[in-house]
Image (tube, coloured by chain):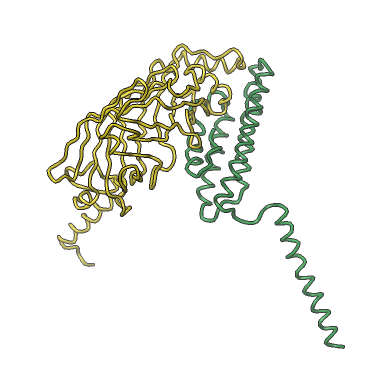
Amino acid sequence: MRKLSGKGVIGALLGLLIIASSAFGSSHNPSKQFAQFAECPLSKPTVSDCVHAVIESGAFEIGNRSVTILNPVTLQGGFEGEGSEIKFYGAENGDTLSKTSQPVPRGMVGVTAPSWWPQFLQDWFNKEIEDGSSAVNATLELTGPSKGLTEVSLSTENLLLEKGTALGLPAKFHLENPLLGSNCYLGWESVPIQLDFTSSTDGALKGDAGAFTFNKAFSITTIAGSTLVTDSFTVPRAEGCGGIFSFFIDPLVNSVLDLPAEAGTNVAVLRGKLQDGNAEAVKKSE
Amino acid sequence: MLSGNRSVMGLSLLAILALPVVAFALIGCGSGDSGPLKKSAFVEEANAICVEAEQERKQGTEDLVDDGDVDPSEEAEVVSEALVSPVQTMTEELGDLSPPKGDEKQVKAIVAAFEDGVAKVEADPVGAEEKLPFAKANELALEYGLTDCTI
């Protein structure tokens, strides 16, 4: 039996490392300053720009609740085209908008089962709330495809010039709590909540383009300190809450959150940083 | 004359042989079982099954409300009959559909996940909900485009 030479062993190990990297790691391996663009859809040759945005803070006011963004949310992907003709492609691994949950203040504290429910259901629900199942998390999730061509709209031009829609997200809110089951949503794939953010003004809300800087080679544009706002979105009734008991629990959730909520009564504010990397430069850095 | 007899016999033989084939084809058409469905047709049929199940669950909810208080000893049975039974029927009907060619494993996994959820809820109709019994089924169903099948 032939023994592997030193070079052979190193080669084999490197091969294994490469396999392991693609199996468990990022889709691409851009280096140094481009590392954040690891999920840029570079497999789509027409993609000219890679996008990586981190929403660091902000809030959603939906119905009668205000949810503060405490846990950073990432939006990543890439686009082709210019101005309003941009086509946004999702992250290579499909994690285009990170599913980052945010705590809903007060959750279901103090909520009691309505008296029209069968007694056994009232007893179960009230006991669970008393025993501590009152915390609720909300997660903003993208609707439509999250890989390939998405329904996300992005205009860096509008963002910088503080006009029109800078970022359009068709979305739904996932409400999470053991009593709400695994399928409790505000907005659905077929009826998304359309969030059209602007860096300009929307009603009483004031956005801000933030400040933009470039790296030495002008291959990365960073827009930091941006504030995107919208109050022009409707939030429909909750659906699917409580699994097989959804026809009992949906009306309760809607009454607790005061839903549906008309456009103009809801608020979304995102603050964070967006980076645009030249796709060619990202590729070359691998 | 001889050749004429031969051709009549040949035709009769052909008719006898063809009869079961035609009958099989007719029965096949009548039952709607014409082999694997195309994905779009499968999704449409599956979603229609799920919408019907949801309507039955809604009716079951109304019946539970109308019935008023349920004897605690009958609670599991009543919930199972009104709310779990439609999901069970839905799961069986989804399993009876012919999956698109190449998607057999994916569809089997969806049906199995719903069966698993039904089993959990049947074992503990009220308490199981906290364990998110249909979480996996919902995830797989949505992934496949069965947007009306989530519970």
Chain A: drawing colour: yellow
Is A170 drawn above or below residue A7 in the view shown?
Answer: above
Residue at figure coordinates x 59%, y 45% from the top left: B44
Residue B108 percent coordinates (x, y): 54, 47
Q: Which residue lies furthest to the left in this view?
A: A216
Left or right placement of residue A73 versus residue A14 in this view: right
Q: Using the image as rendered, state which of residue A21 and residue A254 is in the foreground.
A: A254
- In the image, is A215 to the left or to the right of A149? left
Residue A82 rendering spot, x and y as whole percentages:
30, 46
| For residue A147, above or below residue B7 | above
Asked where in the image residue A227 lies, by quadrant, the reply is top left
Is residue A43 toward the left or the right of residue A35 in the image? right
In the displayed structure image, the side of residue A280 where residue A262 appears, left or right = right
Q: Chain B is drawn in which colour?
A: green
What residue is shown at x 55% (from left), y 43% (from top)? Answer: B111
Front-most of A13 and B40?
Answer: B40
**Residue sitting at x 45%, y 16%:** A108
Q: Position of residue A174 (x, y in %)?
A: 44, 29
Residue A102 to residue B69: above or below: below
Q: Is residue A209 above or below residue A108?
A: below
* x and y percentages locating residue B113 in the rendered image: 52, 39
